Image (cartoon, helix red, strand yellow):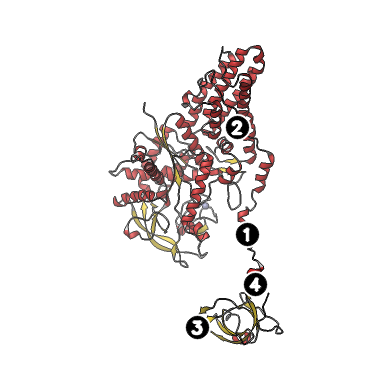
Amino acid sequence: MEKEKILVTAALPYANGAIHLGHLSGAYLPADIYVRYKRLKGSDILFICGSDEHGVPITISADKEGVNPKVIIDRFHQTNKEIFEKFGMNFDIYSRTSLSIHHETAKEFFLEFYNRGILKEKKSEQFYDEKVKMFLPDRYVEGTCPNCGFEEARSDECENCGTLYEPNELKNPKSKISGETPVLKETSHWYFPLGDYQSRLENYIDTMNKAYNWKDNVLNYCRGWFKEGLKDRAVTRDLDWGVKVPVEEAEGKVIYVWFEAVLGYISATKELSKRLKNENLWKDYWQGKSTKYIAFIGKDNIVFHALFFPAMLMAWNDGDKAKYILPQNIPANEFLNFEGKKFSKSRNWGIDGKEFLDLFPADPLRYTLAANLPEARDTDFYWKEFQARNNNELADILGNFINRTFTFVHKNFDGKVPKRGNINNLDSGILNSLKEYPEKISKLFENYKIKEGVLEIMNLARSGNKYFNDSEPWKTLKSDKETCSTTINICLNIIYTLAELFYPVIPFTSEKIFKMLDADRTLWDHCGDENLPSGHKLSKPEILFSKIEDDLIEQQMQKLGKPSEQDQKPKEELISIDDFMKVHLKTATVLSAEKVEKSDKLLKLVVSLGNDEERQIIAGISKSYKPEDILNKKVVVVANLKPAKLMGLESQGMLLAVENEKGKLEILNVDDSVKNGTRVR
Ligand SMILES: [Zn+2]
């Protein structure tokens, strides 16, 4: 039988910040569990992800730091890549949309639609900042949502209520660059006629849902959009960071991120083909008729993956080029909140993946998140729950069962799997459920009920402990050695099954257990069989989970909601007395003062530094001082400043002055008793 070919993508994280636990539980962990499970089922699977590196938030961050956007994306691509590795993500590739292979792919789609006349060119009114002379992309404008009154709404979309509107409907718009009220100015853009695809999209989702049972949250979301009616969407914008629009008349425009980011899955797969020197690999998956494509995302991405991307692929497929497959399922999760509130970096609420994985190993986090996935509704991460899942479930149930069995077998059976003898009722009960478990978990995972599946696997560990207790091997060891060895043989085989069933969820631990068993994984469907024959030599046990103490959890709770160290004002840099003494501050008397022609700011002064030394100083104080007000004043000047030219006049020093609250300059005065040229220190 040919292997089932599956393409799995996980939403491309935005390279503008470190991913946090909410992201991990939204798209990545469920995708990883699914992929690892499917690999054990023997499927031929590709798992694709990468950084989304275009768009306005990145340019805003870059502006804030005064760096090129490339600095931002390089930083966060690396950060997120490392988080994913530590977290155990099993991607075949973690690519980036800034690669030229992606730009080419995005341009190819744009041109295909452009050349076939699918895109409509439309003039529209966009916010324009007259002060900085540029069109403002949506996120550069903030105002009040016309629907819900949210005051931090973007120019065409409200993050609070999810409403989309026209820029002219936004109330009290402000430019985020200059703070000014922007004007609406005409610009020209290309639009994708999404509305033309509505009935086909409805049909597609209906068909897929009937065959593959889509999640209610996804269906309801799409139906909401259908009810509103799909409208044309701009595929270009006025911005210089992104994929350049590949037509001449589109100077200064890039392809809108919504259009090109989803194509990042395709370009990442192309990149993988290139790396593996297997040119056709990406086509085998993306254009293979029998490939099943599953897109894992969080709910904020539903519209892009269930509506926009399929419509783009439909439009492509209407042409005469090789056709793409459409997602078979889009198991979007709801959100994970943190201790009852939304994650917020600015309020220091939550923890990012890097920080977390520096403190704790990945598996307890994976297990805690998996046991509480926001599959049907929003859920919360609680530090106390994390501690309890680790201590009471991973350590006390799974770890304990494995540990007591290993201790027993090394003490009483020379570290070898003892013989399985006659089977009593207790034995056959657990052996039956061992056979049933892989099938039972499989059904749940196939239907994206990952959370339920994970909790079921822990139930098997519970049954293992109960079986050990009920069989009382410590008693039968003396009274009935054959029964005792049967019990331990079965316990070891339960451990084998647990190691395999838990492999998708806690892969690092699973690998340790297989090492302890000195055994390899088998196919999922066989993991409930007798995989460890009698006489098989086991390795030494190791500690699988350490308990997390209260004070460690308490420390983390304490950090919440307080400004993080990075956010606190940097301390003023200290200088040494030597540094200070490099500046020669000297007293001087103003001998003459006159206005500099054609300047309303500058006064030309001549000052005496004593010993017949005179200096010309051009000072920007004309708005605060008339020449006659400053004449004969004893002032402080920087005497060893490099000369500079101002309005063509050389300035051989600088006058010390301070500005008062009203903006008026006050010159630092010194008592007349001090001789000119005296060092100030
Ligand atoms: Zn709103």
Looking at the rendered structure, the kind of residue marked 2 is Leu
Identify which residue, 419 or 259, lies in the foreground: 419
Cα distance, mark 4 to mark 3?
Answer: 37 Å
Mark toward the viewer: 2 or 1: 2
Looking at the rendered structure, the kind of residue marked 3 is Lys
Residue 661 location, quadrant? bottom right
Reading the image, the residue beneath label 3 is 598
- Secondary structure category for the residue under label 4: helix
Mark toward the viewer: 4 or 3: 4
Residue 620 placement (x, y as % from top left): 56, 79
Pointer 2 or 1: first along the chain: 2
The residue shown at (32%, 42%) is 317
Reading the image, the residue beneath label 2 is 544
- Secondary structure category for the residue under label 3: loop
Looking at the rendered structure, the kind of residue marked 4 is Met
Reading the image, the residue beneath label 4 is 581
Pointer 1 or 3: first along the chain: 1
Reading the image, the residue beneath label 1 is 569
- The mark found on residue 137 in the picture is none
Cα distance, mark 1 to mark 3?
Answer: 41 Å
Cα distance, mark 2 to mark 1?
Answer: 42 Å
